[in-house]
Amino acid sequence: MNPKFLKIVYMILRSFFRILPRQSKRAMFLTSLYFYLVKEGMFRNITLRQFSKVAKIDMSGAGMQLPLASKDLIWDKTNVLSLVQEEYSHCPINTPTQCPDWETARKLSERVVDSSPSWLSYERDLMIKDTIRLFYH
C-alpha cells in the first residue's frame, strides 16, 4: 500500500477504533503486534493460517492486510520492541520453545499491553491472555 494513503487510513482508524467492536480491535492488535515482532526478528514468520490458529482469530487473509500493512505505524512509537528484546535476551539460544516460561510471558504481556496504543485497547485481562498466547505456546 502507498505509505501516504496508509497514514491517512491509520489516522482514520485511530478515530474509529474507539467505537469498533472488541473483535475488530483484537484482530488489529494481535495481528499487527505479531507481524511487527516478526519483522524485527523476534518471532519466526509463519503463514496467516498458522497465525490465525495460534492467536485464535477467525479472519481471512484479505482481512489481515490492513493490520499487516500498518504494523510499523502502530508499534514503532511504542517501547514494545525493547521490552520483548530485553526479555528474550535472557533466553538460551538453543531453547526457543521453552523460553520465556509462563510467568515471564504473563509479566511481559502485561507490560506490552500497558505500552500498546490506547485506541487499540479492549478488556485488559483478555488482552493479556491473548498476548500470552503469542509468547508462550
Image (spheres, helix red, strand yellow):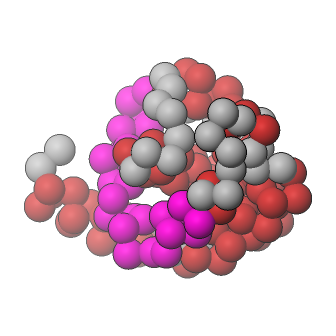
Give residue 61's quadrant in the image.
top left
Give residue 110's quadrant in the image.
bottom right
Give residue 63's quadrant in the image.
top left
**86, 21: nearer the viewer:** 86
Residue 22 shows in this picture? no
Main secondary structure found in the magenta portion: helix
Determine if the magenta segment contains residue 123. no
Picture coordinates of residue 14 (x, y %)? Answer: 41, 71
Picture coordinates of residue 124 (x, y %)? Answer: 76, 70
Residue at image position (71%, 35%) is: 95
Q: Quadrant of the C terminus?
A: top right
Determine if the magenta segment contains residue 63. yes
Left or right side of 28 for 136: right
Q: Quadrant of the N terminus?
A: top left
Picture coordinates of residue 55 (x, y %)? Answer: 67, 38
Picture coordinates of residue 32 (x, y %)? Answer: 46, 51
Compared to 84, does 94 lie above or below?
above
Residue 71 shows in this picture? yes
Left or right side of 67 for 126: right
Left or right side of 3 for 66: right
User: Extreme right residue here?
Assistant: 103
Q: Which residues are magenta?
A: 61-86
Compared to 90, does 107 lie above or below?
below
Residue at image position (58%, 31%) is: 51
**16, 120: nearer the viewer:** 120
